[in-house]
Image (spheres, helix red, strand yellow):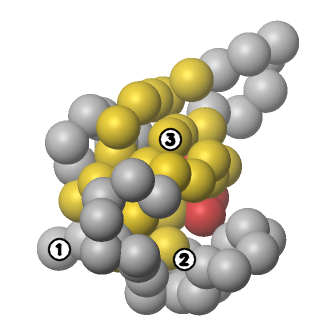
Amino acid sequence: MTHKQKRGDRVGVTANTSVPGHQPGDKGTVLVGPIVRGGGEPYYIVAMDKGGNGTTTTIFRIDEIEPDC
């Protein structure tokens, strides 16, 4: 994936996700990212729509989310 999300971007979870409790197609908004530590892959902190109160945040690798068009 070459697109890098930024704060405020709407994203959807891809089929590559390994995050428990999240399914492909789940939606959220990027809060922080991209974050790269130690030369690894970028990751993002995303506020997920699940839960309805906007306080559920999840960390995703770059290949686990995509732009929600």
Q: Position of residue 40 (x, y in %)?
A: 79, 26
Residue at horizontal 41 percent and vertical 30 percent from the top: 32
Residue at horizontal 54 percent and vertical 86 percent from the top: 24
Residue at horizontal 39 percent and vertical 53 percent from the top: 55
Q: Secondary structure at mark 1?
A: loop
Left or right, residue 47 beside residue 58? left
Query: Which dot marks residue 3?
Result: none
Left or right, residue 55 beside residue 44? left
Per the model, the C-alpha gap separating discs 2 and 3 is 15 Å
Quarter containing the C terminus: bottom left
The residue carrying mark 1 is: 69
From where the camera sits, is residue 66 visible? no
Left or right, residue 11 beside residue 62? left
* Relative depth, front residue between 32 and 65: 32
Q: Quadrant of residue 68?
A: bottom left
- Please, what is the three-letter code of the amino acid marked with disc 3? Ile
- Please, what is the three-letter code of the amino acid marked with disc 1? Cys
The residue carrying mark 3 is: 45
The residue carrying mark 2 is: 14
Residue at horizontal 30 percent and vertical 59 percent from the top: 54
Per the model, the C-alpha gap separating discs 1 and 2 is 13 Å
Per the model, the C-alpha gap separating discs 1 and 3 is 19 Å
* Relative depth, front residue between 17 and 54: 54
Question: In the orientation shown, which residue stands out farthest toward the top?
Answer: 38
Q: Position of residue 6 (x, y in %)?
A: 29, 35
- Please, what is the three-letter code of the amino acid marked with disc 2? Thr
Mark 1 and mark 2 in contact? Answer it, CB < 8 Å. Answer: no
| Mark closer to the observer (2, 3) | 3
In primary-sequence order, the first of circles 1 and 2 is: 2
